[in-house]
């Protein structure tokens, strides 16, 4: 019976870990998009002649 509990705990931590990694990845990607967006805006506002 305690084996099932152990397995359940392992799966739960694994799921949380994967979710955490996904959150980090999403945040990084969102930051990158924001950076590109601001860069494009600044280039549009003062174009290089």
Image (spheres, grey):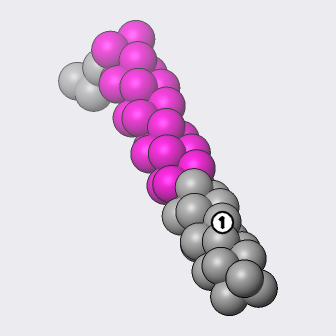
The single residue placed furthest to the bottom in the displayed view is 3
Q: Residue at x 65, y 71 (%)?
A: 8
35 left or right, relative to 13: left
Q: Which residues are magenta?
A: 22-45
Residue 20 image offset from top left, x and y in percent: 63, 59
Q: Residue at x 35, y 25 (%)?
A: 40
Front residue (pair 48, 18): 18
SS for callout 1: helix
Name the magenta segment's main secondary structure.
Answer: helix
Residue 25 image offset from top left, x and y in percent: 49, 55
Image height check: is 29 above or below 11? above
Front residue (pair 25, 40): 25
Image height check: is 21 above or below 46? below
Assign the C terminus to one quadrant of the image. Answer: top left
The single residue placed furthest to the top in the displayed view is 45
12 left or right, relative to 38: right
Residue 46 image offset from top left, x and y in percent: 39, 17
């Amino acid at each position: 019976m305690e084996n099932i509990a152990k397995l359940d705990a392992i799966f739960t931590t694994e799921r949380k870990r994967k979710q955490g990694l996904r959150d980090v990845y999403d945040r990084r990607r969102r930051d990158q998009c924001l950076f590109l967006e601001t860069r494009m805006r600044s280039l549009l506002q003062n174009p290089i002649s």
